[in-house]
Amino acid sequence: MNRNTGECHGAQGRRVGLAMAAMVLAVFLTGFSLNPFHRDPPALLYLAHTEAGKLIETRIEITSGQNISPDKSKPQEMWLIRSGDTIVSTTPPANRAVSFYKSANGGVMLIFIVKVRYFPDEKGGWVPKFQLNEEPLVTRINGRWQPLTTGQGMPGLVVQTGSILPNAEGYFTSLEFSFSTGPSSIDAWLVQ
């Protein structure tokens, strides 16, 4: 390098030039991201339904946060939750909970929570499996909150269908369900 002009000469200058060209090419090829190894977060699960005989899937990522459904205010007869991405790791990923909501009276109402736990697969990865926990319907009786149960003539809101059995810990590889009140929309969710 010439100290007076700041110009690079010889082999060192060519190496610097090649490194700069490689960095510019990496930025260009990765969509102008400064991190050439950037990927979308893994899918925790897929929320699916059918429209006109076609399966419509919404990807729900593993990252915490709330999301508005692209199918907001579109009631469906049947919903399906299926497995997201397998995670390759020496330790299991953290358990997650996804709370699902629908719009009601100008606000939102929690309809159910899906607990997600990762279990090892035969290839050495971790696969998400699901447990559906319905938010119970309650009423105030004598100043105290009391759950309404099927024994009191109140049906559960979520009706699980399908023939898949859970594992020994009560988690399913996928969930198929409908609502006892008829078609219903899932308008938002919160991943925790």
Image (cartoon, rainbow, N blue to C red):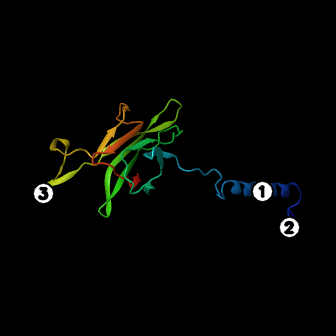
Q: Amino acid at mark 1?
A: Ala
Number of the label disc, if any, that sits on residue 21: 1
Which residue sits at x=47%, y=39%?
92
Q: Position of residue 188 (x, y in %)?
A: 39, 55
Q: Are marks 1 and 3 in contact (CB under 8 Å)?
A: no
Question: Of the residues shown, which amino acid type is indicated by label 2?
Answer: Arg
Specify the quadrant of the image occupied by residue 21: bottom right
Residue under numbered circle 3: 143
Residue type, numbered disc 3: Gly
Secondary structure at numbered mark 3: loop
Quadrant location of the N terminus in the rendered image: bottom right
Q: Are dots 3 and 2 in contact, CB under 8 Å? A: no
User: Which of labels 3 and 2 is toward the front?
Assistant: 3
Q: Nearer the viewer, mark 2 or mark 1?
A: 1
| Disc 2 target residue | 3
Which label's residue is closer to the chain start, 2 or 1?
A: 2
* 121 relative to 29 in the view: left or right: left
Cα distance in 3D space between marks 3 and 2: 85 Å
